[in-house]
Image (tube, coloured by chain):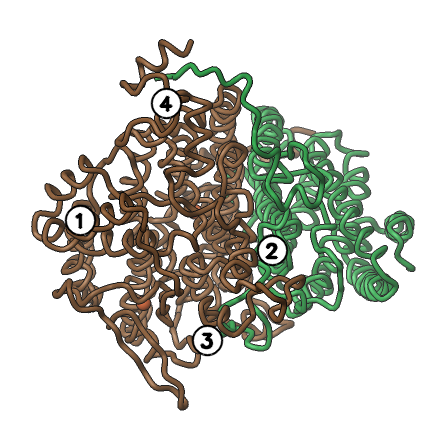
Chain colours: A brown, B green
Amino acid sequence: MAAEGNAKPAKKLSLKENYALLTRGLGWEPSYEKQEEIFRNISFEGIKIHDWEKWEDPFRLTMDAYWKYQGEKERKLYAIVDAFQQNNGQFNVTDARYVQALKIFINGITELEYDSHRGFSMLAREFPGVGPRIAAQMQSLDELRHATTQIHTISQYAKYFTGMNEFPYQFDRAWYLSIPKSFFEDAVTSGPFEFIVAISFAFEYVLTNLAFMPWMSGAAFNGDMATVSFGFSAQSDEARHMTLGIEVIKFLLEQDPANVPLVQKWIDKWFWRGYRLLSLLATMMDYMLPKRVMAWNEAWEIYYEQNGGALFADLARYGIKPPTRAPETIAEKGLVAHQMWSVFYANRDAVGFQMWLPSEEEMDWMSEKYPDTFDKYYRPRYEYWREMEKAGTPFKNTTLPQLCQVCQWPCLFTEPNDPTTLSLRETEYKGETFHMCSDGCKDIFDDTPEKFVHAWLPVHQIYQGNCFLPDVDPTAPGFNPMYEALRYMGIKPGVDGGDFKGSADATNWEKWTSRPANIHEGAYTDAVRDTGNQSDVARKAV
Amino acid sequence: MTVEIRTKSVKPLTNSFGHLQRRFGDKPATRYQEATYDIQSSANFHYKPLWDPEREMFDVRRTAITMKDWYALKDPRQFYYGNYTTTRAKQQDALDRTLDFVEKRDLLRAMPADTRALIEHAIVPLRHYEWGANTNSAHVAAYAYGTAVTSPAMMNTMDRLGMAQHISRIGLLIDGNSGESLLASKTTWTDHADWQPLRREVERMFVTRDWFEVFIAQILVADALVYPLFFQHLDSAIAAGNGSALSSLTDYLMRWYEETGKWVDAVIKTAAAENPENKALLSGWTVTWRDRLVTALAPIAQSTLGNQSEDALAAVVAAFNTRAAKLGLSV
Ligand SMILES: [Fe+2]
Ligand SMILES: [Fe+2]
């Protein structure tokens, strides 16, 4: 029998050859159905692709390698997660204020990972080229991983702290969570090319490091082993996703010169939308981490001004310019974190996490980090509010803020170069006036008003009476619209949000750990037996 | 630093997420439940999708099937990303040992020329069938409703890429890593008369928009005919004269098919039991696609199995009909 066999010795394949043989040849030119009937979404945006074969696969992973590599990472990650749960790792974080930042994470970010899974599934179906489709498929599955590992790690916190227990429900309803929700829905409801430029390039490639590095070091610094573990485990996924982002841009730009202005428009739009979304991180970094890593303005300098500058210098040869609204982001880098914290503080009864005023020690840090702005504009405000708190008449906003039609932030930002003048823009469209927070958002609205008029603006919806549960009777005596709107949003009034001091989280923390709930303010309750450093507490607690 | 705290006595405020408590009561949740239930957004969508302005971004109206609760369509394997990848990694490790064994001994290349030609003609082109299945499965992941369906559908999509690559490796074991058999198999798939009726049906699935119909056509019907026909009947015919070298490689495909069948069966059975309209629709699609696909498979079955082909196809169809009836379909 062997004599009949093929006698030539078998070749050894390089990884690259192996990948090419196992992957690129899989597709075929359909002949029974028309190409445009099979891939129906790739022409309406106006992007021209002449040759999908020119796509360079950024990572040459066959499925067997993917399974093994990812399976190994999962094995290690879940070993840590199991240990974290067994050892009550949730109590190892610096203090209970840190957990408030995790609430924003699970309620506002985790669902984006799922949306991303769906967005990439659509590309996985709709791109005609084998290479980009496989890249999109792997990312779609990776994004499921991110949603899953975040839920599995944060679920331990959700068992012991308030405000994390209704994350999918809140994500669809809470007024400030429409900021991340509308961001990703804008991308998924776009065409496939805008989606991939928005998410893979503008978000993952240009902005992810900014979210990743300060946030993960913040978690590490504050003893949050769960977040650190899923974060670092996701890092090699992110590296692949970023490579996809840059590969996509080059591919689109090289395929046809007519693609350049479209890509530029999307870069301008998604840079601004991504920046507005990440501004949330500004306030988390500067105000919510009990032990701080770096200030927002420093992060912006490193991760956008320096790294982004180099990137756009490199893309100049394609005729791509830096995002039009980049100068505004640089001008206001000393303002955003403080303006946001102020707005959240003022509206603390209407959010699902607890708020506090920065301590002396924290304000001194901000004075040092923001020498041009903090002492001049924000310290006096906080000191005044501190006095009001002491006087028993704490400052509160009782009406809901005006939201930007595009980014859905409250119109809380000032003119980038003038911290004393609120930045308000508006556009008339079909007889109606729409409000925007900035020139960046107004550019976006004016380019596609027909899309943005459909935005589900929570504050408008509340005023229109669309945010009450079915058991509510608005004509009943004692009807409290704000209380009912919060219930609709999945926020437990007086429990999830409000003042940190006196909250269930702060009180439980001190009872359970004997450590202060706010390391900068000393004990709130008698449960704290020692306000000294943590190792002291630990020794005594054993 | 580990802080030792008297936490042994600390009782959690809650045992699981609110959405899981409402479904399963106040008790600790499994990792599958945490990763799956109610994760997809379901309310207050912001914009009209440019690619489907008549519907919401996630919309139950992308299929004619209706469910009171789309999360009833659960995966009995309880796959979430972690146990999915570790399961596949382990299976791949075992498969690698088999591939290594076959390669070191040149078991496929030692087969007679006509057998090698038969494998090239009738097994290797299935890599393109798998790529088609990948497209169809991605369609389900993209447009279905609810994480309970989209998550296993995405895993299935990746599985199909894995199966396409495994079948390609069979080609490489035959052609000594030259890739010639892969090039040839593509022409066979696109041009040879034996394969055109099947390719025609795969391409028909590409233009079918209702995601549940695509699920029925590809993942229920086509797979239930293709897998047993090629990896059991044809495989046995080849093994009869040549030993079990090929079977050691197709066994992986059959095991994967059987494992996936548990998920497929649970989905179809639950959807069919939901209401009579579902049952009628699912049954109708099943019959239509079964009849199309049986006709489409006849030429390749005939040219490879000769006078056994009718019996083989009939056996495959009979087994499928029994399975479909058990799922509550009228076929
Ligand atoms: Fe992600
Ligand atoms: Fe805005």
Q: Nearer the viewer, mark 2 or mark 4?
A: 4
Q: Residue A198's quadrant in the figure?
A: bottom left
Of residue A366 and residue B115, the one placed in the foreground of this image is A366
Q: Secondary structure at mark 2?
A: helix
Q: Secondary structure at mark 3?
A: loop
* Mark 2 vs 1: CB contact within 8 A: no
Is residue A447 shown left or right of residue A492?
Answer: left
Badge 2 is on which residue? Answer: B141
The CA span between labels 2 and 3 is: 22 Å
Against A31, residue A198 (above or below) is above
Query: Which quarter of the image is occupied by the N terminus of chain A?
Result: top right
Marker disc for residue A515: 4
Measured as percent of width and height from the top left, residue B148 is found at 66, 49
Against B125, residue B63 (above or below) is below
Measured as percent of width and height from the top left, residue A370 is found at 12, 47
Do circles 3 and 4 both sit on a common chain? yes
Q: Is residue A296 visible?
A: yes
Do circles 2 and 3 both sit on a common chain? no
Badge 1 is on which residue? Answer: A297
Badge 3 is on which residue? Answer: A43
Q: Earlier in the sequence, mark 3 or mark 4?
A: 3
Q: Nearer the viewer, mark 3 or mark 1?
A: 1
